[in-house]
Image (cartoon, grey):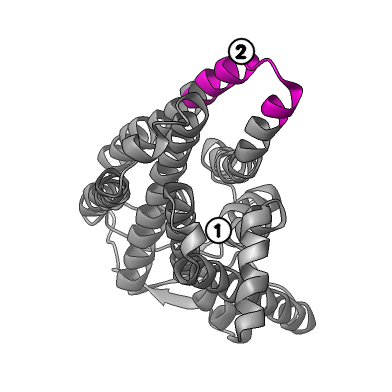
Amino acid sequence: MRNHSVVPEFVLLGLSAGPQTQALLFVLFLVIYLLIVIGNLLLVLVISADSCLHTPMYFFLGQLSFLDLCHSSVTVPKMLENLLSEKKTISVEGCMAQVFFVFATGGTESCLLAVMAYDRYVAISSPLLYGQVMNRQLCSGLVGGSWGLAFLDALINILVALNLDFCESQNIHHFICELPSLYPLSCSDVSASFTTLLCSSFLHFFGNFLMIFLSYVCILSTILRISSTTGRSKAFSTCSSHLTAVIFFYGSGLLRYLMPNSGSIQELIFSLQYSVITPMLNPLIYSLKNREVKACFNRLMKSE
């Protein structure tokens, strides 16, 4: 048995580079974070202010924008601080808190994307009953359930992870704290935490992905039964923004967690994609392709 010294803090080395490179990265990510905050807050404001957008689809979109703002705020401010700091440290408690909120907000977004896929299915398959089926009570319940399920999932994972002991090594080759990055640093058995993470990821993320996939199978089947070309085109256009958001989120997220934890540049790029780039792009994806959002934004600007 060897003696273990308790590690009080970790060092995040994911974006370590020369001073000039780090200064450039700081400016780049500061601009991206400002775009995230402004873009998502603006979309929430437009949806809240215009009664024309008080529909289930835009209710979910407003929730997604708020969620993207929360998700990026868990990681980007600390990343910006470390880019200006020589130490680049984070306390063990702070690291565990970041793990929890990254997991919780990411899990909520996964659920919400599945809910939005179901919303698009109802809108296309039963347009006359859409407002009746997707009533305010159901929409609020689906959003509340998404938050509750994700936070419960994150709580279970973090409670198991709190039993891990961290001893000699304290360098994390990443820019944020995630469970896969902590396992190589633990001097205790990680099998319980790894099994919990694997099971919860399979049930939560893959379960939501399956729901999205089945929703789009049903949507495609419904669209193919539409006789007019105009009708098909309109139905496809209502799904294009959501489908783009799903590809960005799941594409980068799955690739990140399926890759072995090595601290490679590809691993960092995929993590940046779903935690920083996707929250910045979502407002653009949903506003640039959406005439109603652009029209409401123009009306809001004119009224000001």
Q: Looking at the image, is mark 1 or mark 2 earlier in the sequence?
A: 2
Q: The magenta stretch spans which residues? A: 215-233
Q: Residue at x 47, y 77 (%)?
A: 89
Residue beneath disc 2? 225
Q: Is residue 136 above or below residue 13?
A: above
Query: Is residue 183 at least partly visible in the picture?
Result: no
Q: Residue at x 61, y 82 (%)?
A: 303
Mark 2 packing: few (<14 Cα in 10 Å), some, or many (20+)?
few
Q: Secondary structure at mark 1?
A: helix
Q: Residue at x 37, y 59 (%)?
A: 99
Mark drawn on residue 275? 1
Query: Is residue 238 at least partly visible in the picture?
Result: yes
Q: Give the percent coordinates (x, y) of residue 29.
A: 67, 74
In this view, the residue in front, 154 or 159, is: 154
C-alpha gap between disc 1 and disc 2: 38 Å
Q: Give the percent coordinates (x, y) of residue 227.
A: 68, 15
Does residue 228 belong to the magenta stretch? yes
